[in-house]
Amino acid sequence: MNYTEHFEKIVKEQLARVEELKKAQEAPDFSSMEKIVIGTIDGDGIGPVIMDSCRSVLESLLADEIASGRIELRRIEGLTIENRIARMETVPSDVLEEIKKCDLLLKGPTTTPGKGDGRPNLESANVTLRRELDLFANVRPVVIPEKNINWIFYRENTEGEYALGSKGVDISDDISIDFKVTTTAGTRRLARAAFEYARNNGNMNVSIVTKANIMKKTDGKFLSLCMDVAKDYPEIKVDDWYVDIMAANLIDDKINSSFGVFILPNLYGDIITDEAAQLQGGVGTAGSANIGGRYAMFEAIHGSAPRMIEDGIGEYANPSSLCRAAVMMLRHAGLTDKAQKLETALDKAAEALDMPGDGSGNTAADFTEYVLKVL
Ligand code: IPM
Ligand code: MG
């Protein structure tokens, strides 16, 4: 492989992407929209099981809005691993076209073929969708009332190690190189979103998490840009941490409740948010919002759990994480009362039901029945 040509090509692609980033897209004003189209994407593995449950819940919660035509729940078909492999497209183009006709998206988990599992090397559908829809902020709240923990993570969602994750090079048998990208526009818009959230929610502390002592260019740039944006928010207390010690801080009960808003580059955000979700009760309990300019996509933070399907216990999948994502979606659309109502019902379900995910306890159908009853 001619790697100098390859390098030149990806640098040019990234320079072109940055020019696109600079043309900021307006977020839709949901309150003035006549109709809001919510696309639901099942995904793979346990995806259809938990989406079934979540759709039933939304159909009941939004019955009036759906009847009046203000809201449409639209099923988007075809984002399955089988169809993606058959088409050899990470997100088949006709599916992407349908997705782009929606205003909001609720997405189940999609399977990513791993190296060595015998399937073609498709890129992750999540990563592709985040990039195609330019969903730059991955927002993940973690709340643990008994520990007084109220965290919200602003993970950069389109850059870092993910920007060129499938464009690394095997230079020879002896050496492989991947790339990591930080852009000024990409970092600033994420930092701005996080600081705005901190300000609008009672000036929560903001912690910037990098490894800028080692990744001097990319993380160094990320940190200094976040610090620069911080100057516009003088009332907010800001600190910066390296990701390794932050991983330790999160499990230190002496200090973890002092953190509020976190700003992180993509990969550290991926890892740290799984850790945080586990402290809250497991990755099945946390929702995740992917926010861009024109589009926003809401999803469970966990994967498609193919093992549960292989073991024949798919019906025991826990729809909580996807339903929590739906709460975030309703809030994003300004449907605050509906969001609150659903959140309360989910809290009650978490108390009342036992869903360890090992084929014992309550099923997704029990969950649906319980939540519908509370609603
Ligand atoms: C997440 C997931 C994804 C990621 C995977 C499925 C590509 O782990 O949303 O955190 O790495 O971002
Ligand atoms: Mg992850």
Image (tube, grey):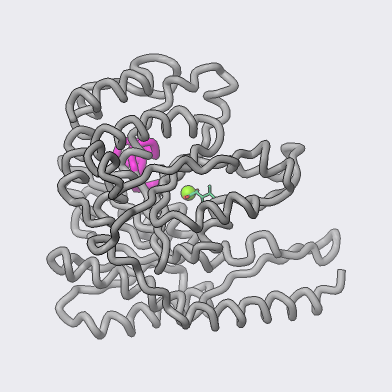
Majority SS type along the magenta span:
helix
In the foreground, 117 or 295? 295
For image coordinates 34% across by 43% down, the residue present is: 286
Q: Is residue 342 left or right of residue 136?
A: left
* Image position, residue 277 (x, y; %): 35, 44
* Image position, residue 291 (x, y; %): 39, 61
For image coordinates 73% across by 48% down, the residue present is: 88
In the foreground, 99 or 182? 99
Q: Is residue 117 left or right of residue 350?
A: right
In the depicted structure, whether residue 306 falls above or below residue 32: above
Task: Specify the farthest residue to the front.
Answer: 68
In the rendered view of the protein, which quadrant contains the C terminus?
top left
Q: Which residues are magenta?
A: 274-286
For image coordinates 57% across by 62% down, the residue present is: 162
In the foreground, 296 or 361? 296
In the depicted structure, whether residue 155 falls above or below residue 277: below
In the rendered view of the protein, which quadrant contains the N terminus?
bottom right
* Image position, residue 170 (x, y; %): 79, 62
In the depicted structure, whether residue 349 falls above or below residue 74: above
Q: How many marks?
A: 0
* Image position, residue 213 (x, y; %): 47, 74
For image coordinates 27% across by 56% down, the residue present is: 333
Task: Specify the farthest residue to the top.
Answer: 360
Q: Is residue 122 magenta?
A: no
